[in-house]
Amino acid sequence: MNLKKDGLKVLLPGLAGRDFRWLPRILGTLIGLLALGEFIEGFGYPGELDTRSMMLRVGFFVVFAGCVVGWFKELAASLIIFCGTAAIVISGVPPLGVTMFPALVGLLYLLVQLAGKKK
């Protein structure tokens, strides 16, 4: 067993399968739709938004964009979702448990990318 050569395929053999790719895609679709809903909800009264609320809405939109990109490119999706999650955390408005779900989807996309990486 050569861990450097095979990487995550040795440690977590289920990640290399094609079926595992669908888990982050399905979860990403659900999280993306929720993020899009939160993004649109904030535009009811755009004049009343302060800086934190704007940052929160931008973070939700970036998470949504990352979930859309995840259908095509896993690595780019994980980085975009992590950036959106960071913007949500920096805004300080929602509880930290809310930001756990987009970060989990980003982590799953990253694991799929690393497991399917060809040497």
Image: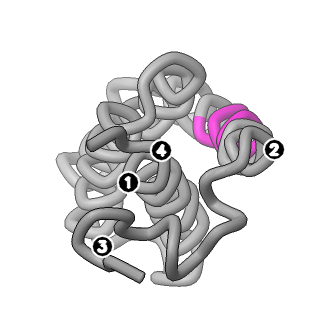
Q: Which mark is residue 114?
A: 1
Q: Secondary structure at mark 2?
A: helix
Chain-order first, disc 4 or disc 3: 3
Q: Is residue 80 above or below residue 107?
A: above
Which residue matches tag 3? 92
* Label 2 crowd (10 A; few <14 / some 14-19 / many >=20): few
Q: Which mark is residue 35?
A: none
Quarter residue 32 falls in? top right
Amino acid type indicated by mark 3: Gly
Chain-order first, disc 3 or disc 1: 3
Q: Nearer the viewer, residue 38 or 34?
A: 34
| Residue 48 in sight here | no
Distance (Cα) linking label 1 and label 2: 15 Å
Whole-percent x, y for residue 18 in the image: 73, 39
Left or right: residue 55 compared with residue 85: left
Amino acid type indicated by mark 2: Asp
Any magenta on residue 80? no
Whole-percent x, y for residue 98 in the image: 58, 71
Q: Secondary structure at mark 1?
A: helix
Q: Nearer the viewer, residue 68 or 43?
A: 68
Q: Nearer the viewer, residue 57 or 97?
A: 97
Quarter of the image for the N terminus: give it.
bottom left
Amino acid type indicated by mark 4: Gly
* Residue drawn where x is 26% and y is 43% of the image: 119
Q: Nearer the viewer, residue 54 or 104?
A: 104
Left or right: residue 60 compared with residue 54: right
Whole-percent x, y for residue 22 in the image: 77, 40
Which residue matches tag 4? 116
User: From which residue to which does the magenta span run?
Assistant: 28-35
Left or right: residue 30 compared with residue 79: right
Which residue matches tag 2? 19
